[in-house]
Image: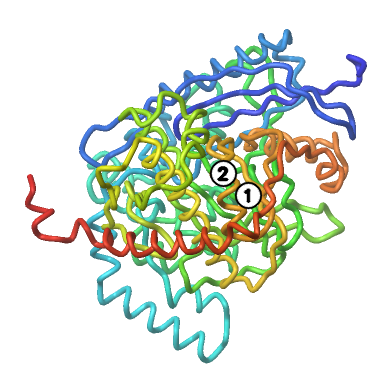
Amino acid sequence: MAATDRQYIATLDVGTTTIRCIIYAAPTNGQPVTVGTAYDHVDLIYPAPGWVEISPEKLWTSVLQVIRQATEDANLKIEQLTCLAIATQRNSFTCWNRNTGQVYHNFITWKDLRADQLVKDWNESFTLRLLKFGASVLHFVTRSKRFLAGSVIKLMNPQITLRLAWVLQNNPSVQEDLKLGSVLYGTIDSWLLYRLRQGTDLTKQVEHISDVTNCTSTGIYDPFGQEWAGWALNLFSIKKELLPKVVDNSYDFGHVHETLLGARIKIAASVSDQAASLWGNCCFERGDVKITMGTGSFLNVNTGTKCLASVHGLYPLIGYKLQGGAGPPPDIIYLMEGSSNDTGSIIEWALNVGLFDDPAASAAMALSVPNSDGVLFVPAFSGLGPPIRDDTAGSGFIGIKPSTRKEHMVRALLESLAFRVALLYDCALRETGFSFTCIRVDGGVSKNDFICQTLADLTGIEVERGEVADSSALGAMYMAGLNCGIWSTKRQLAELRKVDKTFAPDGAQRAKRLKQMRAWERAVDRFKKWYMLEDIKNLD
């Protein structure tokens, strides 16, 4: 590939625990290659039990640092970069002053539980029950999927809704400046887009925007109407003036200001991490399904151009939206998403307590014994999400006996992660009515062959792991390249995807695996509502 044929795309990927920048060299309509990388850790702050924050200034310093370092690693200069793509974790937010640029508080991350009591109170409130009843009546009359979704609504900690309401109730500076109309709210993508275009002058005012894939999962955005949900804003006293303008993924995001890195860089795409992962796995067709197994596990089903409602706890989202210009209509794809907040966090805990010395060795340990010797593990550090939906569930091993060895415990732990994801898959089957032929997996935990094979055996379909396990950066780069004209169609991108390994289901093992999963579900029943038990509450 001739040097003159290359266009360089820098992709900034801001995750929960790491931030990285990858420089891709991409020929027109050709295969991109990585030419530079840089990484930094995201320092999570725990100021109080259940509170999980990120310092905006530390994050900002890391952002500029990794872009510079990745560019140097690629032996390039900033002015040689064609464009920048941004992929970010969802539902971590801060508020800042539009006149001074100063933030009012740290980023409150999606793992934060400070609004947990508010979540419980609202879910049990007469107001929400009345709202759900009204929605169910409207659904009966209209048969609208929008009202079906409203009839089963449940507020959750990972959503923005009540954490933002908590800030509005408890931050005096925010309350005071709200009266002046000078407070802005934004998730990480929104804040970065503001700062990157603002440059070094924090008093400069730029357009306050956020892309649709970051807005759609907040809990205050209506994917059916493609707008901020007025009922939620009114119910929780959130002023619309706080919120960014929602834009599509091919919007003109402007440029990184030259005062930051020494040259202007076109911002060609902004997208949430899960939507970027969808692009990285090239799940462009209706019925495509991918599971990202990182800090948490996220199952996404492409439902095409229809937004479906969920009665089992999956969440309807906008997967991406690209404008078709003056001629064709927008290219918009919807998703159904189910999540489990504890996957990589379980692996990290097992490493810290000494169940294994290297996560890469865990699959071999699990395979060194024929079964778990009757030991089961429930992975519920953050409760159990859909379809179980029990925030008070506990974690733990059950079935330990004198014959139990460390290998049995490791096998039980890895099996539990596969069981948890299989529950989401079964839920997706019921919700969509689709027939799936393949699951595409990515994320750090997808590198574990034992988990992937167990998932294939449980679901009875192939599990396909791409060559790039961490595909958020790859997907954001694809989106930016399409927006810039480096590629012409999504079909071209799909042809670029490379598969690392395919795990075929073992029919002889499936009945055994499903029997193990049913036993695991009985163990889950034992751990449900664990932290509601008075004896457990009073242990301290």
Assign a secondary structure to mark 2: strand
Q: CA distance from mark 1 to mark 2?
A: 7 Å
Q: Is residue 77 above or below residue 86?
A: above
Q: Is residue 420 above or below residue 105?
A: below
- Give the camera-side residue of 67 and 364: 364
The amino acid type, in three-letter code, at marker 1 is Val
Q: Which residue is mark 2?
A: 209
- Asked if residue 372 shows in the view, the reply is yes
The amino acid type, in three-letter code, at marker 2 is Ile
Question: At 73% from the left edge and 22% from the top edge, which residue is drawn?
Answer: 34
Assign a secondary structure to mark 1: strand
In which image quadrant can residue 207 be found? top right
- Give the camera-side residue of 398 and 14: 398
The reply, left or right, for residue 434 in relation to residue 80 is: left
- Give the camera-side residue of 221 and 378: 378
Question: At 38% from the left edge and 29% from the top edge, which residue is drawn?
Answer: 351
Q: Farthest residue in the front direction?
A: 403
Q: Are marks 1 and 2 in contact (CB under 8 Å)?
A: yes
Tell me the quarter of the image containing the N terminus. top right
The reply, left or right, for residue 148 in relation to residue 277 is: left
What is the x, y in percent for residue 295? 46, 39
Colouring rule applied to residues: rainbow
What is the x, y in percent for residue 200? 52, 19
Q: Which residue is mark 1?
A: 247
